[in-house]
Amino acid sequence: MRLPHLSTSVSALAFTLGISGVLAGTAAAQESAFELQILHTNDHHSHLEGSDYDLTINGQPVRAQLGGFARIAALIEEMRTPQTLVLNSGELNGTLYFSLFKGRADFEVFNALGLDAYQIGNHEFDEGEELLRELVDMATFPILGGNVHPTEASPLHGADLLPYIVKEVEGEKIGIVGVLKVEKTVESSMVTEAVEFSPEYETVREHIAALEAEGVNKIIVLSHLGYDLDQELAAEVAGIDVIIGGDTHELLDSTGEIAQLGLEVDGDYPTIVDSPDGAPVYIAQAWEMAHGMGVLDVAFDADGNVLSAEGNIILPVEGPFRTEGEDEQFHELDEAAQAQVLDFIEQSRTLAVVEPSAQVTEILAPYSAELEEFRTQQIGTVTETLGFERIPEAFETGETPTGSYAAYYVADSFLHYLPQADIAIQNSGGVRSQFLAGPFTVADAYTMLPFSNTLATVDLTGEQVVSVLEDAADYSLTSGSTGAFPYASHLRFDVDKGAPKGERILNVEVKDRTSGEWSEIDLAATYRVATNSFTALGRDGYDTFAEAIAADPSAHEDSHVAYAVPLIEYFQNALADGELPVIDPAQYSLKSVRD
């Protein structure tokens, strides 16, 4: 394995790579009393293995194997020194690894990594407090809760869920404070009232005061608040030196290389915010899905003041490197092109060719084998082959409905997965195969829903819901993108395909999740709409979704759960005997369609 340059600072680079004899000549080298290396990850969402990813290398599209904890473990093993902390800002759930193993595979890997601290995320509560207690008990590393306070009524009561810890590194005390976003956890997980939460900023302030009273003058906040709130926290609470963040999946960079790889940069690495006392606070995140690992080198003076903090994310990759041919298939690059890619990586600060850790590969092997076996297992039965037209043919109320029954059932699976949602909308083109009569397997679910879309919610007014339907219908009928046509669960309407935009969607009704009664949509009411991440961001003509999120980013929540997972669990848990029934016209999203 060859490591890239990790910092523009000579002293920081020498420290990061474990090179002895740090050169004098910089302020940090001349004045620092202590140097700390922080290796960090966040928001992996149970993406334990690497995955194919398309990057731009030497200006050309190249597909490589990217990330995964076996490669991250190899990076940690190579880079760890006595002055290193390995931190994780949390977030489980999102792949079949979690659906099958409920975090146990994740935590076995984390035990092998030798984490110094882990801050729980909101998704750690997705399967309830009893499972989280099991995971906390399983961990051989400190788990931070910070502002999480289980009462005696919670299975988490008495668990080693710590507000903060003190790590001694080369004789220096480092305080690590945990904090979790309260509102998001309460509203978007299965946490109960038996767990109480204290205010985020107030709690951090109190814990810093306690640490300072113990004589600790170097403070790291391990945060699951999100990038914007981390910056706000830094500006409002004194005493923080570094925030290692999570929740919002930010890809930060100050090298200029990440954008050249064809990736979107969300801010500087590290992002610097002045604290209330004027001291700089350094904020870092390391993207998502175990794609990479952040490396932050921090130099302190004798009083615990930060002299410098520099670094970047490392994206561990592995060949063979491929590119798409004229036949739309990916082919391995020839020897000369492979050499050019490797030379590019050799010069890069942010890319590294990394051979996976044998230890983590061995840990994952039985889980991976069981997962592959599960893919072939029958999870249900389709009673009869169902309609699969993207744009429905005309039919009258009382006649057999047309359209994509598959898209309707996918939307219905979203609602069963998200009890907090009111309605669900799925674009027909996001469903790539129909329900055929006979056995239905996990592999069938992924064939039907093959994209990297995730399950998301957007809060909309009733008026905006109607606008979303109008947007999608118009785009599907006028742009040539037939896959935009909307299907829904707990939402039904008439369609007039021949009418002008704004007049095609008629008589919209909503089904109440509690009473089961249908009623006219309330244009002024707010509805939580489940959909896939593609349409939530305004793709396929779903402009109103994007406009609503732009006006109020807090209206949008991405679960980061692959959108095939709800369909799998729908067959397993929601359908009687796992049988997908014949469509009930009264529940179907289309009441009638006119040409």
Image (cartoon, grey):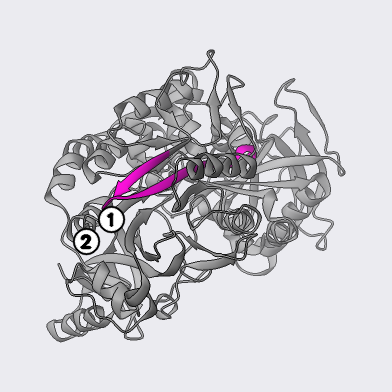
Membership of 555 in magenta stretch: no
Q: Is residue 327 visible?
A: no
Q: Is residue 183 left or right of residue 306?
A: right
For label 2, the residue is 79
Nearer to the camera, 381 or 557: 557
Please tell me whether mark 2 sits on a helix, a strand or a loop. Answer: helix
Q: Is residue 517 above or below residue 234?
A: above
Can you tell which quarter of the image residue 308 is in? bottom left
In the rendered image, residue 123, in percent from the top left (x then y), is placed at: 49, 38
Q: Which residues are magenta?
A: 165-183
Amino acid type, label 2 = Met
Whole-angstrom CA distance, mark 2 to mark 1, is 8 Å
Please indicate whether residue 532 sits to the left or right of residue 214 in the image.
Answer: right
Q: Report whether 355 appears left or right of 386.
A: left
Q: Residue at 67% across / 43% down in the picture? A: 529
Q: Is residue 113 visible?
A: yes
Q: Are marks 2 and 1 in contact (CB under 8 Å)?
A: yes
Closer to the N terminus: mark 2 or mark 1? 2
- Seen in the picture, residue 580 relative to 201 is either above or below; the reply is above
Q: Nearer the viewer, residue 463 or 438?
A: 463
Residue 544: image location, x then y, percent: 73, 58
Residue behind mark 1: 84
Say which amino acid is labelled 1: Thr
Question: Residue at 42% of width from left, 76% of height from top?
Answer: 262
From what the image shows, is residue 182 above or below residue 158? below
